[in-house]
Amino acid sequence: MRNLTLILLNRCQSQLSRCAFNSTVKITQNRFYSRPTSFPDYYQNPIFRKEDQAKLIENNDLSKLATTPFRPPASYETSSVYHDPIVNKVINHVMEDGKKQLARSLVEKAFENIKRIQIERYHLATTPEEKSKIILSPKDVLHKAIENCKPLLQLTPIKRGGITYQVPGPITEKRSLFLAIKWLLDAANEKDRTVHFPEQFAWELLDAANNTGKVVKRKQDLHRQCEANRAYAHYRWQ
């Protein structure tokens, strides 16, 4: 009986030591794989697009970056002609609960609706001038819509003397792009239950590409507020 208990105790100790070893191995592996993701601040973002590389070659700036350290590109960053960073960013904004495949299918359906509407307009146009103004590529429509919706100014709340002022100021390119995509999606979600998201999103993109619609009006209202509050602009430096 005593020998049996000793055997059971040895087995339990060996299993406990094995579990502890496996946990330490997993921790060390996780630590090892998490190290390369953090780089110093002087590391620059990779230039993986062929268009950007061609611009560097034209401006003779490629030799200046010969000794500059770069971060490795992410798994979704590629130089393929089918990869568009703006489309990928829109898909990430549409995505909810990590369902990226569903978000991609919704954006693709919106592109199909844009293509169908633009082809109908192209065939209904009577003059070559009208046909030349119609954009048939859905990606070009998306780029033009976002460019028309990007604000140039923003209002920043600053408290002075117990009073909060809405101070106008310039906006960064990253923030401007974020607001343009966010406003387009907000306008697409403000729809009736009978209208699906891809259809409404397609119409919002077409209206914004023509410099009309709710999103362009929202940008213009923001610019008017910034113009009305220009008297508080000096609070930015106080």
Image (spheres, grey):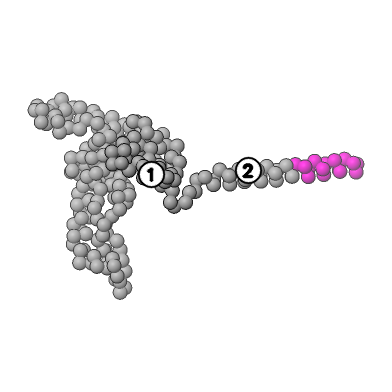
Q: What residue is shown at x 10% (from left), y 31% (from top)?
A: 129
The answer to which of 191 and 13 lies nearer the viewer is 13
Q: Which residue is mark 1?
A: 65
Q: What residue is shown at x 85% (from left), y 40% (from top)?
A: 7
- Find residue 26 and name its label: 2
Which residue is at the far left? 127
Q: What residue is shown at x 68% (from left), y 42% (from top)?
A: 22
Residue 2 part of the magenta segment: yes
Secondary-structure class at tag 2? helix
Give the residues drawn in magenta, as a range: 1-15
Amino acid type shown at disc 2:
Lys
Image coordinates for residue 132, horizontal then vertical, percent: 14, 30
- The part of the image, by quadrant, that contains residue 236 is bottom left
- Find residue 96 and name its label: none
Q: What residue is shown at x 35% (from left), y 41% (from top)?
A: 62
Quarter of the image where the N terminus is located: top right
Secondary-structure class at tag 1? helix
Image coordinates for residue 59, horizontal then vertical, percent: 28, 41
Examine the rendering and report whether any part of residue 17 can be seen.
yes
Q: Earlier in the sequence, mark 1 or mark 2?
A: 2
- The part of the image, by quadrant, that contains residue 65 is top left
Examine the rendering and report whether any part of residue 94 can be seen.
no
Q: CA distance from mark 1 to mark 2?
A: 38 Å
